Amino acid sequence: MQMNSARFSPNLTMNMAIMPRSGYSLFAAILGVFSVAGILLNALVIIVTLRHKQLRQPLNYALVNLAVADLGCAALGGVPTVVTTAMGYFSLGRIGCVLEAFAVAFFGIAALCSVAVIALDRYVVVCRPLGTVTFQTKHAMAGVAASWVWSFIWNTPPLFGWGGYELEGVQTSCGPDWYSRDLGTRSFIICYFLFCFAIPFSTIVVSYTSLLHKLRQVVKLQMAEGGTTAKAEVQVSRMVVVMVLAFLLTWLPYASFALSVVIIPDLYINPVIAAVPMYLTKCSTVFNPIIYIFMNRQVITYVYYCFTYHFFKKQIAPQMSISLLFMDCSLVNKAS
């Protein structure tokens, strides 16, 4: 992996030609807000889960794993980028570029895979493709381990010559080398797109499509129960739409940008515009905990309990069994 060391010098002339100083300050401020929020929200998810054993059940492992991955991405990717963007140039040197890019890619892809694992877990629990096999801890742990192993497999090749990590966007952060015309690097980017975006996205779409189909079957069988299930269908449908749209919003621009540059080597994209997809992916560290966890009223109850206990010493524990799965699986399974 070859990098021009001169590009990492504190000479702001080239970067100021890309974007005025005020632009870097604005980018740094926006990313700073999202990075701090991402760290706080995901840390809160982890702390609340550790404090309440009702939350530590197999269905929730992938959700907590998502929080861990997002926390790593916000802390090791978002914070350094805020600092370098505020300075107006990448100040961490060549080695820092590789480490920052690897950290963002490693935690980012692990988070993306965790989203796919969450969808797959829900599909397995609700649709029961394995028949009478019960979703257990070993299945949940396998999904968690798979997300990290998959991310490690596809983010280490640039460290050893297949692909590479380079400065990107407004030259204040690093990522996979999309612009190289080297055949080996281009082949890596294509594989990266296929295995780290297309496959997880397909898993999400297929899983949630099957889940919604199952829910519609339940609606037909349970309409006599006062429309409760019909309301559940609307709620779940909305949640699925939000999940898929959030995934596309945060990852599709970045994936499309990368693939476009690889397919059309002479394509020119303004550096400021090219930086936007990168910032969107880092903003997913805030979107994910809000969509997957804090939109769950039961989790909010536990968060509220933690705050009231610590600040007001009220010891009124929630009297409910927690599952971060967004629907009543027992109800859905009646259609089986």
Image (cartoon, rainbow, N blue to C red):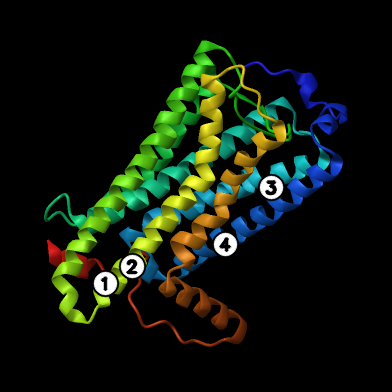
Query: On the picture, is 55 further left or further right than 256?
Result: left
Q: Amino acid at mark 1?
A: Ala
Residue 137 seen in the figure: no
Q: State the SS at label 1.
A: helix
Q: Amino acid at mark 3?
A: Val
Measure the C-alpha gap from mark 1 to mark 2: 6 Å
Q: Earlier in the sequence, mark 4 or mark 2?
A: 4
Q: Is residue 70 above or below residue 165?
A: below
Measure the C-alpha gap from mark 3 to mark 1: 44 Å
Residue furthest to the top: 183
Label 4, on which residue? 41
- Residue, x 48% and y 52% (percent of image)? 246
Measure the C-alpha gap from mark 4 to mark 1: 32 Å
Q: Amino acid at mark 4?
A: Leu
Label 2, on which residue? 234
Measure the C-alpha gap from mark 3 to mark 4: 15 Å
- Residue, x 84% and y 30% (percent of image)? 17
Label 1, on which residue? 230
Closest to the camera, between mark 4 and mark 2, is 2
Query: In terms of depth relative to the viewer, which is nearer, 28 or 64?
Result: 28
* Marks 4,2: beta carbons within 8 A: no
Query: In terms of depth relative to the viewer, which is nearer, 196 or 228?
Result: 228
Find residue 111 and report its horizontal and vertical position in percent: 47, 46
